[in-house]
Amino acid sequence: MKTAVLICPGRGTYNKTELGVLGRRFPDPAMLAGFDARRSELGQDTLCALDGAARYSMARHTRGDNASALIFAASYGDHLSIDRDGIDIVAVTGNSMGWYSALACGGALSPQDAFEVVNTMGQLMQDSLIGGQLIYPHMGDDWRPDPGRRAELLALVAGIGARPDHALALSIDLGGMLVLAGNEAGLAAFEAAVPVLDRFPMRLPNHAAFHTHLMAPVAETGRARLSPELFGQPDLPLIDGRGAIWWPGASDAHALWDYTLGHQVTETYDFTHAIRVAAREFAPDLFIVAGPGTTLGGAVAQSLILSGWRGIPDKAGFQTTQTEAPFLISMGRDDQRALVTKGE
């Protein structure tokens, strides 16, 4: 049996190529029907209607109230599909919104309660839509660490964020990428100050200023609507956006609620450090990235390189190691999915 850390993706991972993924892969129709019954009660489009649409719509499918629920369902469905006779999941983590999915996969929230958390926070984010996000690389195409470049960019961010009427901060430390969030003045100032690299700096559509102090009103409303009673002890170790580990049988459920609807919403989400902790504390045979999509795989690989995992120095080294013995499994890829699931 192989050990694995399960990694749940965040916003931006359900795209055109993922349309229909729930219909094809979600393994528990009754559970999906329960999610949709709740959305119908709230007057929202059902997941089956969104996932079964004739065509993908950026305006419709990337809205926070729709995207969050679609992504959670796809991730949790993948979690259910893993062959537990051959794979021992030793810890769970996630990126940004993926933390809510991780709470369900790790047993700290029931699937239904996790869906309530995801759906509520997604709706609150969409209703407020405070600020925005952009993404910019600090690694080159070879994925070699460049700490000097990263420090320069973060100094620039801090300088812009200190200007009057400008808000800008590191939202997510995402492997070789910096996800920045702020108000329009802050984002525009950063875009004007850095060189254009391929498609970067790239604004993220329908994204708010996640993981910054601008989200304090959303966090406050979320805490009012979502009871601490929803949260319990995890069944598996959970690695949060600070790299802290919530251990089964030793976690304070109220503190878990407080982190999830407090720090996790308003402070930087350090996904790179979460992966570093996963690698060093659990030393798994595999890192399994749940769907939807495959875009988080690169950030996981970059985070492992930055962590010195197996001495891999760059993209070429990662590709060589991955070819010889695949250790990073993206469930959004059919060929890799087959390595960790029973026949579907």
Image (tube, grey):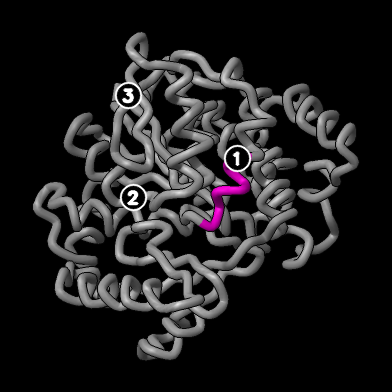
Asked if residue 217 is among those painted magenta in the image, a careful observer would answer yes
Asked if labels 2 and 3 touch by Cβ distance under 8 angstroms, the answer is: no
State the SS at label 2: strand
Q: Is residue 159 above or below residue 309?
A: below
State the SS at label 3: strand
State the SS at label 1: helix
Main secondary structure found in the magenta portion: helix
Q: In this view, does 89 lie to the left or right of 38?
A: left
Residue picked out by circle 3: 90
Asked if labels 1 and 3 touch by Cβ distance under 8 angstroms, the answer is: no
Residue at point 56% right, 39% down? 75
Residue picked out by circle 2: 270
- For the N terminus, the quadrant is top left
Q: Which mark is residue 220?
A: 1
Give the alpha-carbon distance from disc 2 to disc 1, as whole Å: 22 Å
Part of the protein shown in magenta: 214-220
Q: Is residue 246 left or right of residue 277?
A: right
Query: Does residue 342 appear in the picture of this structure?
Result: no
> Which of the marked residues, 2 or 1, is nearer the chain's N terminus?
1
Q: Is residue 4 left or right of residue 44?
A: left
Amino acid under disc 3: Val
